[in-house]
Amino acid sequence: SKGFNNSEKFVVGQDAAIIRTKNKATAINGFYFTNTTYTYKSMRYGDAFARKFGDTTGTGSGTTIAQGAYPDFLKLVVFGYRNGQKISDSVEIYLGDYRSSNPAQDYIVRDWRYANTSKLGLVDSITFKMSGSVTNAFGLATPLFFGLDNFETGPANLVGLSQVSVKELRIFPVPVSSYLHVQLS
């Protein structure tokens, strides 16, 4: 597998993962996400632990939901922390969503998509919590892994700050091809 924009490396995250920033107040403006191959195939085809999305065969669901129309989902929620305190805002990302009454809108993410996390503001860490509809006696049965790439950080929401002091400024890459990165410390 390749990362966003065919990069050679990307991060595989999992439920309850934590990313800590170097600086005490960093804005994580966003990042690219996707399913891992394992998670995608489990949702698409089912496996020894989880049924495929939308399929109620053998689940004993006891509902009136039509075969193949079960409202499955796998969701990733991003929470921000500042000084050990959880920020009230969060960002929801659906890795697979079969909840629509229109089956044409059902999807499982298999490409890189952008998650805008700028509303979290300045953070010193973020955590990831996964939830979903396919469960068994032990909890979620869908594999709890996801891909992350190209974190964008910066001084996103500086409203109310009268001054920002910078000890070091790094700008890269030089020359620029598509993205210019500015790192403040």
Image: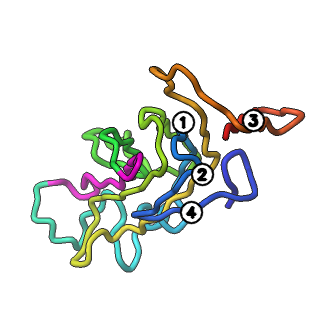
Q: Residue at x 29, y 64 (%)?
A: 134
Q: Name which quarter of the figure residue 54 lies in.
A: bottom left
Q: Name which quarter of the figure residue 43 lies in.
A: bottom left
> Which-is-in-front pick, marks 4 and 2?
2
Mark 3 touches mark 4? (CB < 8 Å): no
Identify the mark at residue 29; answer none if there is no mark.
1
Q: Tell which of 174 and 98 is nearer to you.
A: 174
Dot 4 amino acid type: Val
Dot 3 amino acid type: Leu
Q: Earlier in the sequence, mark 1 or mark 2?
A: 2
Q: Is residue 165 left or right of residue 65?
A: right
Dot 1 amino acid type: Asn
| Residue 63 point in image, percent of width and height | 11, 59
Task: Work out how far the residue at label 3 is from the one at label 2, CA to CA, in angstroms.
Answer: 14 Å
Q: Is residue 61 left or right of residue 152?
A: left
Is residue 140 depicted above or below 172 in this figure?
Answer: below
**Quadrant into which the C terminus falls:** top right
> Where are the magenta residues, as a range?
65-84
Residue highlighted by disc 2:
22
Task: Work out how far the residue at label 4 is from the one at label 2, CA to CA, in angstroms.
Answer: 20 Å
Task: Check disc 1 and report its element: helix, strand or loop.
Answer: strand
| Residue 44 point in image, percent of width and height | 44, 61
Residue highlighted by disc 4:
12
Task: Check disc 3 and report its element: helix, strand or loop.
Answer: strand
* Residue neighbourhood size for the residue with mark 1, other residues' Cα within 10 Å, grouped as few (<14), some (14–19), many (≥20): many
> Which-is-in-front pick, marks 3 and 4?
3
> Which-is-in-front pick, marks 1 and 2?
2
Task: Work out how far the residue at label 3 is from the one at label 4, CA to CA, in angstroms.
Answer: 29 Å
Q: Name which quarter of the figure residue 16 lies in.
A: bottom left
| Residue 47 point in image, percent of width and height | 41, 75
